[in-house]
Amino acid sequence: MYNIFITGEWKGVEEKIMAFYLAFKEVWRNKGRFFLFSLVIALITLLVLFIAALATGLSTSNKQYLSNLDSQLLVFQENSELQITSSRLSQSKVNQVRRVEGVADQGLIGTSLATIVFADGREPQDIALLGVEPGKPGEPAAIEGRGLRSKRADEVVIDRLIAKQAGVALGDTIIIKSVQGTEEEYFDLRVVGITTEQRYFFQPSVFVPLYTWDAIKPQAALAGDTPLAGNIIAVKLNNPEDIIPMQQRLSALVDDVEVADIPTVIEVLPGYSAQQSTLNTQQGFTFLIGVLVLGGFFQIQTLQKVGQIGMLKAIGAPNRTVAIATLLQIVIVTIFGVALGVLAVLGFSLGLPAGIPIIFTGQSIIIAIAALLVIGPLGGLVSIRLALRVEPLTALGL
């Protein structure tokens, strides 16, 4: 191999082969050292992927039900600032929305929180209690059983998370505890359907007919004969592309309301933007730490082998071969460390409890892995530059 350096018979393929040989040989001869550093990269990978999964999980837990709505627009009470809990809308508003040209369907939705209690003494399950109109926008499709059929029936559709966590099945009767005035009231409701996960404000959801919801929702005082009022109206359009014109039309033709599309509503959910920006900042700092750690390690490695690099240059190795060998070494160690980190994430994810809001998606994993593979060479740029500046005679003490 060294004859290639001495004779100067260099070609592109030979340079690459020699660079790969040098990089792999050093990694192999110092397996322990490089393995330990691969573990550091694996820990960085583990941290990055879990932060990405946590951001996705918290985001999903906050907006899952709204994101899955079969509608394009949401109608709020005027001056509610698009806050669902601050909005109150009566059935008369639903009738006004129905008469607006371009509206295909609409459904009044009521939201509240409640608790499922179990007769066998199991831990109570906090839930989002959502009142919907059967067959209207707002009611999710059942993947098991059937949907709601009557506005006043004592029946519910539960999301899959409740069925899994609480062991509730079709045909079971659940007991919902609700505070009515100053007293705790209990309501028996039969499970007629199970839908996909539909978490709302971090809680799994139970869907009940709107009038049933109005009777059992938590309230400060007994409602008596007060008219039914929900929180928002989900609006499905004849043409889903006409979101902006229909938003303006509904605002003009329906009195005392605010209208917004679903992405806008999600962005103003309490704490949503701050939560996501915090997690994204943490992920960014983790990438920065990764660059600094990688850069520092490979710089120390390069300083420790200045004499070897000087010898290679002295026998004819060009700077390009030294640079390629250094870069390949960085890439090999980074790929191995990232692979270890992905395997560790897979192992941890299999053992996580169901209630923890961590969701791994293909897109977030691919983006995170690609970024990690980029920061390796990026962090090693300093060591490559340092290797290129090594003078053979100086390195050899001559």
Image: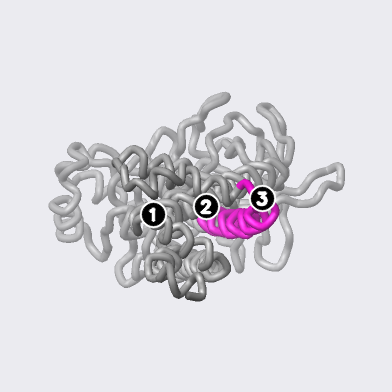
Residue 323 visible in the displayed image: yes
Q: Residue at x 79, y 45 (%)?
A: 118
Q: Seen in the image, is 127 located left or right of residue 93?
A: right
Q: Residue at x 26, y 59 (%)?
A: 259
Depth-wise, is mark 2 or mark 3 nearer the camera?
3
Question: How far from the left and from the top, in percent, is residue 301?
Answer: 56, 65
- Vertical arrangement, residue 381 with respect to residue 73, above or below: below
Mark number, residue 71: none
The amino acid sitting under disc 3 is Lys
Res 381 → quadrant: bottom left
* Magenta span includes 75: no
Q: Residue at x 28, y 39 (%)?
A: 105
Labels 3 & 1 near each other (Cβ < 8 A): no
Residue pointed to by mark 1: 317
Main secondary-structure element of the magenta-colored stretch:
helix
Question: How far from the left and from the top, in percent, is residue 183?
Answer: 73, 63
User: Which residues fall within the magenta stretch?
Assistant: 28-52
Query: What SS does tag 3 mark?
Result: helix
Alpha carbons under labels 2 and 1: distance apart: 25 Å
Question: How far from the left and from the top, in percent, is residue 163?
Answer: 67, 36
The amino acid sitting under disc 1 is Ala
Q: Seen in the image, is 121 located left or right of residue 331?
A: right
Of residue 349 and residue 62, the one placed in the foreground of this image is 349
Alpha carbons under labels 2 and 3: distance apart: 14 Å
Of residue 13 and residue 121, the one placed in the foreground of this image is 13
Residue 270 visible in the displayed image: no
Residue pointed to by mark 2: 334
Residue pointed to by mark 3: 31
Mark 2 or 3, nearer chain start: 3
Query: What SS does tag 2 mark?
Result: helix
Q: Seen in the image, is 206 located left or right of residue 237?
A: right
